[in-house]
């Protein structure tokens, strides 16, 4: 089979029989359907379709990897498998079809950073630009799409984010191949619900499909080798909606299945409902028209209008809609997630809610150096104005004396916080090499003999190969380091900037607050107590653009509240190991209470108390913060009870993903 590096480059996470059988079971197959998997892998999905009663002669697959494709051919014979690129016309000419009753797949999840042209062992992967162009050409040739439908698909293709992974064009392709009244059935990472770059896909679904089921891997156990939580989606192709107002009262079913249901043969083997077990019990659950929950399972009926409402609160969606439908005005509706509504007993009036920006803050991501092994070191000791640093293992952890003017304290890891919420310079072991002046003269000699050890370290680094994406490269050859090399104009003439000179830091690199992007427990906010601390890209960062220290303490309290932590549990991405990934895009989506003078004053005082670091007192302070927030959102009536309900909900969410 294909080696591990190539598998990762191709985004191959094969589904396995249990996931494939569950997805096929959701598709209401009769045996009359023509079925295709355009990214077939080893044929798990197609085998499941055959086991569900579809004759192999009606099964087709496309697979770019010859090894996986050959195995797929054997498994689904006499079904048709074309080994080649699904974004090229050749497979469809060979298969003599471009319209299917069921398009079922686990699309490849290749990150946009890896979507350069790739060739290995007979496999050629298109670049992101080539993929977009090829997809556009394919859409033009699909005869079952009318002119309006083609125009809509082309608009989506031209406007999906350049940050999208390969799954986004794969989604568009699969949707276009689905004929009227057919179904699309996909394995998707949970992030497709929360990431801004997936908005194009959600828009496409609402224009062409009725979502029927979204099934959630509650405990992140379906894929052992993937790093994110998995969902399954099944949707039925409907008449093209010229306006999203045509959605009406359509409802889909959101189902959560826990690890306790898994048996040797299926993901629902231990599911028991009304005396039925396994898939018979699942069918019983799917036929329910009300919300049902039990041990390790839950089903909720959700209106598609709710799906649209959550999209409409995104500023990115508003910009996207202007491109896709210039004549349509997006009416942003401030609405909290349905789960939170259920916990607190109803929705909150939109007039009581606002976004982070109203509080005077912006959010982004910490520093990406492009070469952490060089730019980050550990402090061994200090003598006067010189720090003695321990270099990375690639440099055999050599000790380097470096002038402090070239160094900044760095907050790299959550463990650096020592279980606290306040970050100070004195507690940080890491130092960032932040050289902003040329240490060499015009002849290439160092200008100050005191910098000789630093110059020696740079010289060693320039001749030390490191592994990058399976290849050996030197630091100055790394794609994120090369742009450092340039000449800048200054008053005194041209200033040379070398590979080891990072760009000038911005507010997002030296923020007042930050939240770890990967959280095994609650997503806690840290307060950066000292100026000049650099925060690494392992954190989402927040900095103030309007206001002062009072607002910083107030936001510190607000972000450590049960309200915010519960909100993030609801909208952020659960990774494969059960950790919660909190990106800047998630924090931007938070709906918060209005920043009244009274609330700012109250939260600021509570934030100061929380920053004092008295751990036994912290839970009591957070309870006071919770009461202040919920009273602001809902009024003081029953706020204590709702605070308790929110804390119970938060703990249940954390427990569920840690199982």
Image (spheres, helix red, strand yellow):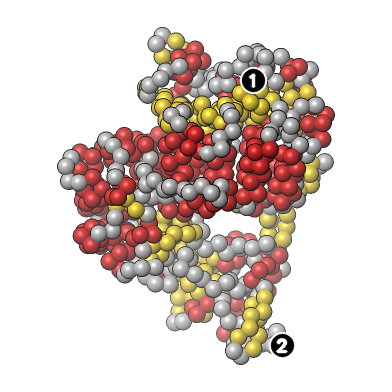
Q: Say which mark, if any, is on residue 443.
A: 2
Q: Where is residue 150 in the image (x, y as percent from the top left)?
A: 67, 39
Q: Which residue lies furthest to the left in this view?
A: 637
Secondary structure under badge 1?
helix
Q: How crowded is mark 1: few (under 14 residues within 10 Å), some or many (20 or more)?
A: many
Residue at image position (36%, 36%) is: 339
Residue at image position (48%, 49%) is: 329
Please report whichever mark, 1 or 2, sits nearer to the chain's N-terminal start: 1
Residue 601 falls left or right of residue 486:
left
Q: Can residue 2 be seen in this view?
A: no
609 up-or-down from 323: above or below = below
Given residues 524 and 389, the one toward you in this image is: 524
Residue 523 falls left or right of residue 245:
left
Residue at image position (32%, 58%) is: 556
654 up-or-down from 449: above or below = above
Task: Name the quarter where the N terminus is drawn.
Answer: top right
User: Residue beneath label 1, please?
Assistant: 48
Secondary structure under badge 2?
loop
Q: Where is residue 298 in the image (x, y as percent from the top left)?
A: 40, 25
């Amino acid at each position: 089979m294909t080696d591990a590096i190539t598998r990762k480059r191709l985004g191959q996470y094969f589904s396995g029989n249990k996931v494939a059988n569950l997805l096929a079971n959701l598709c209401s197959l009769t045996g009359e359907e023509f079925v295709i998997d355009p990214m077939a892998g080893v044929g798990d999905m197609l085998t499941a379709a055959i086991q569900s009663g579809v004759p192999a002669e009606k099964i087709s697959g496309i697979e770019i990897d010859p090894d996986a494709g050959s195995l797929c051919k054997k498994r689904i014979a006499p079904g048709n498998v074309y080994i080649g690129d699904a974004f090229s016309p050749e497979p469809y000419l060979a298969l003599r079809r471009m319209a299917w009753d069921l398009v079922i797949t686990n699309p490849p999840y290749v990150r946009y950073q890896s979507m350069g042209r790739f060739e290995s062992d007979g496999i050629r992967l298109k670049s992101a630009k080539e993929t977009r162009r090829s997809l556009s050409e394919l859409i033009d040739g699909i005869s079952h799409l009318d002119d309006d439908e083609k125009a809509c698909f082309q608009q989506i293709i031209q406007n999906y984010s350049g940050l999208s992974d390969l799954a986004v064009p794969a989604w568009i392709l699969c949707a276009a191949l689905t004929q009227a009244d057919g179904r699309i059935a996909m394995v998707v990472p949970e992030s497709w619900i929360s990431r801004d770059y997936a908005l194009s896909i959600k828009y496409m679904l609402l224009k062409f499909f009725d979502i029927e089921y979204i099934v959630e891997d509650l405990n992140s156990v379906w894929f052992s080798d993937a790093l994110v939580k998995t969902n399954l989606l099944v949707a039925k192709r409907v008449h093209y909606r010229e306006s999203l107002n045509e959605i009406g009262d359509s409802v889909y079913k959101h189902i959560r299945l826990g690890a306790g249901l898994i048996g040797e043969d299926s993901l629902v083997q231990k599911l028991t409902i009304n005396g039925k077990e396994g898939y018979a019990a699942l069918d019983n659950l799917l036929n329910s028209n009300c919300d049902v929950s039990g041990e390790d399972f839950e089903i909720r009926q959700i209106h598609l209008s709710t799906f649209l409402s959550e999209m409409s609160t995104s500023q990115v969606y508003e910009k996207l809609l202007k491109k896709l439908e210039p004549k349509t005005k997006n009416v942003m509706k401030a609405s909290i997630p349905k789960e939170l509504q259920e916990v607190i007993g109803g929705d909150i009036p939109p007039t009581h809610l606002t976004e982070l920006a109203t509080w005077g803050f912006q959010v982004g991501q910490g520093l990406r150096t492009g070469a952490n092994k060089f730019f980050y070191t550990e402090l061994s000791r200090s003598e006067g104005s010189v720090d003695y640093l321990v270099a990375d293992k690639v440099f055999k952890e050599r000790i380097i004396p470096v002038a402090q003017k070239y160094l900044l304290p760095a907050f790299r890891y959550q463990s650096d916080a020592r279980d606290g919420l306040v970050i100070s310079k004195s507690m940080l072991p890491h130092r960032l090499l932040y050289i902003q002046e040329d240490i060499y003269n015009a002849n290439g000699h160092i200008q100050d003999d005191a910098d000789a050890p630093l110059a020696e370290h740079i010289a060693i680094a320039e001749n030390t190969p490191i592994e990058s994406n399976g290849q050996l490269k030197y630091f100055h050859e790394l794609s994120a380091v090369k742009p450092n090399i340039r000449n800048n104009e200054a008053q005194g003439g041209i200033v040379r900037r070398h590979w080891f000179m990072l760009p000038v830091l911005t507010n997002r690199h030296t923020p007042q607050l930050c939240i770890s992007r990967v959280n095994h427990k609650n997503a806690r906010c840290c307060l950066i107590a000292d100026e000049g601390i650099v925060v690494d890209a392992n954190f989402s960062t927040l900095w103030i653009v309007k206001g002062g220290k009072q607002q910083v303490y107030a936001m510190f309290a607000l972000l450590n509240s049960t309200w915010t932590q519960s909100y993030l549990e609801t909208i952020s991405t659960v990774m494969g190991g059960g950790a919660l990934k909190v990106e800047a895009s998630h924090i931007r989506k938070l709906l918060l209470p209005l920043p009244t003078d009274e609330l700012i004053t109250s939260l600021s005082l509570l934030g100061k108390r929380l920053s004092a670091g008295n751990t036994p007192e912290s839970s009591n302070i957070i309870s006071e913060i919770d009461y202040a927030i919920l009273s602001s959102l809902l009024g003081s009536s029953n706020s204590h009870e709702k605070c308790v309900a929110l804390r119970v909900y938060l703990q249940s969410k954390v427990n569920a993903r840690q199982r």
